Amino acid sequence: MVLKCPVSGKSAADATLASSGAVAQCPFASAAAQADPASRDSEADASQSSAKATCPYGFGSRANDEATSEKDGAVCPMGFGSATPKDPLAALQCTRCKALFYDAVKIACGHFFCRSCIADVGDCIMCGADVQDMQPEARLQELVNLYLEVNGDANAFEAKAALPKGTVTQAHPQAHNGSRAEFLEQQALRSLAGGNVAAASQRMGLCRDALLEDASSAGYSPQLCYRLGSVIGVQATLLEQQGQAEEAAEAYRESIAQLKKSPEHTPEVVQAMAVSLNKLGDKQYLGKDLCGAMQYYKEALRVRQDSCKGAEAVPAEALLGLVTSLLKVVDIEQALDDQAAAEEHMQEARSILCRAEEVVPQQGPLWAKYSGLQAFVQQVE
Ligand SMILES: [Zn+2]
Ligand SMILES: [Zn+2]
């Protein structure tokens, strides 16, 4: 498995550091050792015999694994002392979820993982040793947090983490150059792709904070409101997956509140608002509060109807959104035994579907959605 750098997309094998002769040098070792290549060997020896003095991690090398594991079970996460040193930034990354560490722990064999990434695994995925004795790894987590704080800027990271100049910048001359929110969203998505929901949720939260800062300096544009609303909406879904129902509901409400700040109800803003309202409705529905669910579903329907009012040509996506909202309302009306209202809304859904048929492209996700709704309506008939 090749580790990819979250910033450059390069693998450890591409890293200049790996081929620059600095193979045995731990980048977290003292600046003096880094600055004077001639003294590298003696410094390396010194750091091996008193690893705690030179490596801020306090780790030894793989060469003296056994000696150090007796003391603290440590393996240098940078690969110090091993034949295959890691990319300096890949060292901040969990080998299980392939994203930046979240709640980093060290297990007895000396390998590092996010707590939740190793909690359900019997054997270390790096060396096969029994997973036991999870110790919080504060220094490593602190480095990850610093990296997040500086938006992945390699220069700033070196300075903040008090690492020798060139430790990271040699391998990553190009720092991340997007906005802070983009950077954090990327990191959240990486964690999500790796299955670490807690990490993704925390990083979506940081992304939300970054967007709020953007809003306070540049104001609320429809685009920014849309991003805020969707990021918080995703965060809500992640909270829900972690069983935090109350926090999830609060996040959905906040998502709606941010979307309402948009000076213009663009199709994206309307869609995101309706989705969050429907999620809140679904929660009430699952909690058997049908009237509560109805309020949210109807508000979602109203938001969608308002956005279509006066429009010359309503886009296919908006039409299908309307049908979805109508069917949710019908479902509750039937459950509440209000047959007349249910039939009226069903008729409306059918006629909008007929309009949609003329504008939906006959392939792709919109077509799939249209076909699904059409099949549902026919089945009710
Ligand atoms: Zn992980
Ligand atoms: Zn291990």
Image (cartoon, grey):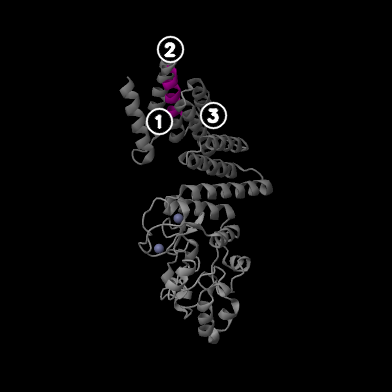
**Among numbered discs 3 and 2, the one appearing first in the sequence:** 3
- Magenta residues span 322-333
**Among numbered discs 3 and 1, the one appearing first in the sequence:** 3
CA neighbours of label 3 inside 10 A, class few (<14), some (14 to 19), many (20+):
some
Q: Is residue 239 visible?
A: yes
Q: Which residue lies under the disc numbered 2?
A: 340
Question: In which quarter of the view is residue 10 placed?
Answer: bottom left
* Residue at image location 60% in from the left, 35% down from the top: 257
Label 3 residue SS: helix
Which of the two marks, 1 or 2, is nearer to us in this view?
2
Residue pushed farthest right?
217
Q: CA distance from mark 3 to mark 1?
A: 19 Å
Instruction: Count how many numbered circles sit on residues in the image.
Output: 3
Asked whether the beta carbons under mark 1 and mark 2 sit within 8 Å of each other, the answer is no
Q: Which residue lies under the disc numbered 1?
A: 356
Identified by mark 1, the residue type is Ala
Asked whether the beta carbons under mark 3 and mark 2 sit within 8 Å of each other, the answer is no
Q: Is residue 151 above or below residue 240?
A: below
Indicate the position of residue 201 as horizontal and vertical percent values.
51, 46
CA neighbours of label 1 inside 10 A, class few (<14), some (14 to 19), many (20+):
many
Q: Which residue lies under the disc numbered 3?
A: 303
Horizontal arrangement in the rendering, residue 191 relative to residue 207 (left or right): left
